[in-house]
Amino acid sequence: MTVEEKVGQTIQADIGAITPDQLLHYPLGSILAGGNSSPGGDERASPQAWLDLARAFRAAAAARPGARVPLIYGIDAVHGHNNVVGATIFPHNIGLGATRDPDLIRRIGEATAMEVAVTGADWTFGPTLAVPRDDRWGRAYEGYAEDPEVQRMFAGPMTFGLQGALVAGAPLAEGHIAGSAKHFLADGGTLNGVDQGDFAGSEQSLIDIHAGGYVQAIDAGVLSVMASFSSWNGLKLSANETLLTDVLRGPLGFRGFVVSDWNAHGQIPGCSNASCPLALNAGIDMLMAPDSWQPLYESTVAEVRSGEIPMTRLDEAVRRILRVKVKTGLFADRRAVEGDFSQLASPAHRALAREAVRKSLVLLKNEGGVLPIRSGARVLVAGSADDIGQAAGGWTLTWQGTGNTNADFPHGDSIWNGIDEAVSAGGGVATLSPDGTFTDRPDVAIIVFGETPYAEFQGDVETLDYLPTDPLETLRRLKAAGIPTVSVFLSGRPMWTNPEINASDAFVAAWLPGSEGAGVADVLIGDGDGRPRSDFSGVLSFSWPRDATGTPLNRGEPGYDPQFAYGYGLSYARGGAVPALSEESGISGVTTNVDRYLVDGRVADPWAMVLTDPDGESRPGAAKTGASPGGAVTVSPVDDLAQETGRQFAFDGSGPGSVRITGDPVNLSRQANGELTLSFRYRVDAAPTAATILSVGQGGVDIGEILKAAPADQWRTLRVRLSCFQTAGSDVEQVGTPFALSTDGRLTISLSEIRLASHENDSVCPGQ
Ligand code: BGC
Ligand code: BGC
């Protein structure tokens, strides 16, 4: 192989930033479909479109003159083939952890591999073997448990399920794909649960806690390992030769290849997204360079030629990648299942997911035998019972899992569907009433509520307080009316919910169950006599907290004092009364809203709104009306999604004016790396007469033309990618003003819902 061909093997591009045609010229060895990437940018693309895309890339790579090594194509199938509409969406790992059922895990691995294989991908970025130690981490739900005993129990079966057994001299069997154990190492150990943060722990705790699962995955033959974005004692894992090479290749005996995470190499001091000899030299074999692959390829070729990357190191990386490609069957004639879309959400896979949902439910309380519910009862179903998107969580069709409706799950059942079916079959009546109001008095009410979808750092929180107040009000209202209440709590982590538990007769932790919500009714709704059809068997794999502070709470640690301990879980056989719980949250209520600025009609804490003109600045505080000192800018409330949730700003052109949201500086670089956007709703009430600069920190873009083109009096959404504000001389590491709008001219504009949001296909970069 030429140097170019070898380097190409070590570089992976994202389908959102490379076309098949480019593979005719660049000898890249791999592509991935990231969380927000899809065929033609359509997150709802058909399975056929996914397969066509895989084939187009494969064909182009093979058509390059001299090509001999096939492309390997990876995707995040982390709870089923979750990027594809119509696939089975299994519970997230936190729910699977509660099942303690390794055989179930193996079967889920098999089903997932089959669904991926039929759409033409070769490799999944899983199993996730993180051991989340701080539940404030936005990826806690991707881990099976806070205690590595569950990772040790599941890592082998999941690997066998995905890959099948490795057989000497033969490729993976049909319907199996390569796995990737991630994120090596201690991604779940970062301080304060900060995503991509630092694990400041001892070598012994790496061995005792965070390595749990890797040993078993490697023994089962996992073909790749993904290096973590995080650091160990300040050193980024992607640059940690000791862990990546000495430990992983030595005592852990790993023989596959190591892939780095999404532009993680660019975070290593001395590297950029476009150049990073350090990562390869430390033991990364393949660099995930989603949109930076082209300059990275060029610089890596030069670094090999100059000797900065030794040829022996490059050869070693390429040899490992080739071995995996051989084992994965890329050189063999082995694609018989491709295009068999009947595998997607097949009856067998759906039944398996439903079984997983049943087994993942953890019963925290069951006072007075309110559960199981007699199937002939009159059942009121409140809250978000009919929302499969919420039940599926992050990493579902989109990266953050936001914006999904039931129509996006053509083969799925919501929790409501299952309850309705079971109750109707027993001669009872179920009524869906999201706000919990009713005309016919029910015998019992089920309230489904919890967290809304998030992924990665967007899900990092400061406390474990469950903030929304509507569910609690609904529970209390029903209880006051003498109606027994059953809470079904959806979440990616345990949360402090003592007030909600006190207001419920029964409380079920249902985690993020996915597309087969009917598994909930299998356990909650009994037969006509109120005898169980299935009992609860799930037990906590994460300790449930006594207060909301979020202080790490893990079995075996000094001072361990949970509300419900690791391993807790009631059942019909075991009874269920729980004494009244303390409602002292232990926190003051002040949180830092890194990503929310003007939401629900309020300037979010701890931000302040500032109006500026040549005479100085003013801070309206909580007031909805105000003016800058010289009167050039005024603010008044307007109605948007609800009464007075927006603000109208009038710039009279008498001098330069601006409106800013300011506070203590926050670091938005992770958000920019994740292609988050500054998003807001706006209505142009009088078009601008001059340039109108939108800025984040020091970086600004002119949105004057966009505002001029916007139809008057119509609310619209604008999303500008944060990376657009990262111009020369300005970074987003110290942002004290995450939003500012300024103009010298006249303009009247109404704004609402100013916040950071995930990148959707409508996001822009004005002036570029
Ligand atoms: C995540 C990985 C994921 C990769 C590709 C990263 O941001 O940390 O878990 O596999 O993106 O989508
Ligand atoms: C991608 C994800 C990736 C993330 C990295 C997103 O735009 O779609 O796959 O994990 O960026 O921060």
Image (cartoon, rainbow, N blue to C red):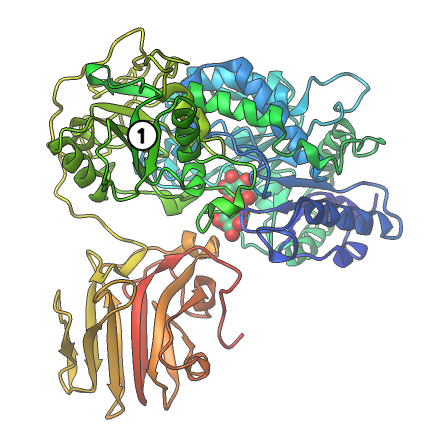
Whole-percent x and y of residue 528? 36, 15
Q: What secondary structure is marked by label 1?
A: strand
Question: Nearest the camera: 393 or 353?
Answer: 353
Callout 1, which amino acid?
A: Val
Q: Quadrant of residue 71?
A: top right
Question: Nearest the camera: 503 or 369?
Answer: 369
Task: Residue 760: tell me if it is visible.
Answer: yes
Whole-percent x and y of residue 246? 57, 26
Whole-percent x and y of residue 718? 42, 68
**In the drawing, does residue 303 fall left or right of residue 470?**
right
Q: Quadrant of residue 359?
A: top left
Question: Nearest the camera: 262 or 414?
Answer: 414
At 32% from the left and 55% from the top, the residue drawn is 595
Whole-percent x and y of residue 746? 30, 89
Image quadrant where one finds the N terminus: top right
Whether disc 1's CB lies below 8 Å from ligand 1 is answered no
When the figure is inspected, residue 187 is found, relative to residue 248, above or below; the finding is below
**In the drawing, does residue 502 fall left or right of residue 640?**
left
Q: Which residue is mark 1?
A: 488
**In the drawing, does residue 503 fall left or right of residue 124?**
left
When the figure is inspected, residue 439 is found, relative to residue 703, above or below; the finding is above
